[in-house]
Amino acid sequence: MAATGWGIESAIAGKGLDIAEPDAGLTLRFFGENIIWWIIIVPILAILGFPMYSFAFQVFEPLTILILVFAGLTFGFCYVCWYKSFPLIRAGAASISIS
């Protein structure tokens, strides 16, 4: 499933990034992921009885914030470089290099 998902995403992103910037693709991807999580998955988990509010407030602990900042910087750099590779080396090679 991961190879199929990455292959489809890289094929779509490769075509779209011929005319767009990698930063725009990154923004659209994360916006779509947020919609999936906050509109579909989190409400379902809350209905099933998971303590979603207590999980959410754990984000504001200092060590967690520090880890999230560093993870965000490194992941952001990684994804921008990955999206930048789609128009340069084509979709198939970019998806193979990640998996």
Image: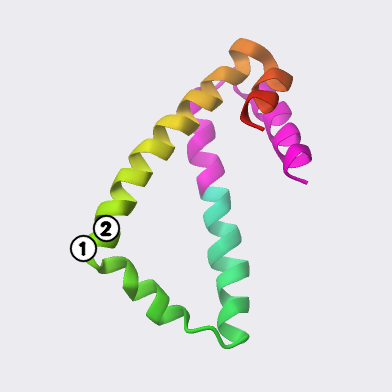
Q: Nearer the viewer, residue 62 or 32?
A: 62
- Report x, y in % for residue 77: 40, 31
| Magenta part of the chain | 1-30
Residue under the image location 58 percent in, 67 percent down = 39
* Residue 18 visible in image: no
* Marks 1 and 2 close (CB-CB < 8 Å): yes
Q: Could you tell whether 83 is left or right of 23 in the image?
A: right
Residue under the image location 74 percent in, 32 percent down = 7
Pointer 2 residue: 65
Queried whether the magenta region covers residue 18, the answer comes back as yes
- Report x, y in % for residue 8: 75, 35
Q: Identify residue type, mark 2.
A: Ile
Q: Nearer the viewer, residue 20 or 68?
A: 68
Q: Is residue 78 above or below residue 20?
A: below
Dot 2: within a 10 Å radius of its alpha carbon, few (fewer than 14), some, or many (20 or more) residues?
Answer: few
Pointer 1 residue: 62
Secondary structure type for disc 1: helix
- Report x, y in % for residue 34: 52, 56
Q: Which mark is residue 49?
A: none
Dot 1: within a 10 Å radius of its alpha carbon, few (fewer than 14), some, or many (20 or more) residues?
Answer: few
Q: Could you tell whether 17 is left or right of 75 in the image?
A: right
Q: Is residue 17 above or below residue 26?
A: above
